[in-house]
Amino acid sequence: MKTKTIKVSDFSQTPKGRFYPKDGLYTGDKFRKDYLEKDFDEYDKIIVDLDDLYGCPSSFREEAFGGLARIYPIKDVLKKLEFICTDEPPLIDEIHSDILEARK
């Protein structure tokens, strides 16, 4: 099984907003395009490490992870992505909700 780990804090410790550049430099769509979409077809499992962040706003989460579920089938996104978050474990449930509620 081919696996990749992505630390969101390597992208930014303060991710926020939906759209680059309108909402800033470290937005959900930029993270999705530069990290998640780029690797989605190449890897069987993508581990997303959410530790070491100073917040992870809903706008960023929904656009990054919910946005991915508007491109790929929701079941594939849920199967392929695995989350690590020891700093704030409820964040994982919030992201799963963002994915499940994504609209095509």
Image (tube, rainbow, N blue to C red):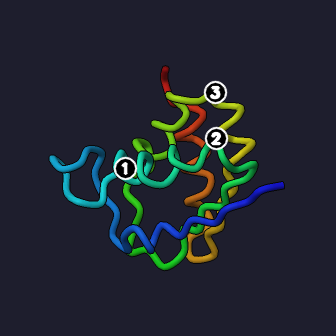
Disc 1 residue type? Gly
Label 2 to label 1, Cα distance in Å? Answer: 19 Å
* Residue 81: image location, x then y, percent: 67, 50
* Residue 9: image location, x then y, percent: 45, 73
Above-or-below relation of 41 to 104? below
Residue at 62 percent across and 52 percent down: it is 93
Q: Quadrant of the N terminus?
A: bottom right
Disc 2 residue type? Asp
Foreground tag (3 vs 2): 2
Q: Upstream in the sequence, badge 3 or badge 2?
A: 2
Q: Upstream in the sequence, badge 2 or badge 1?
A: 1
* Residue 6: image location, x then y, percent: 57, 65
Residue at 33 percent across and 70 percent down: it is 14
Residue at 40 percent across and 54 percent down: it is 31
Q: Nearer the viewer, residue 54 or 6?
A: 6
Q: Nearer the viewer, residue 41 or 84?
A: 41
- The residue that disc 2 covers is 41
Q: Which mark is residue 28?
A: 1
Q: Which mark is residue 73?
A: 3
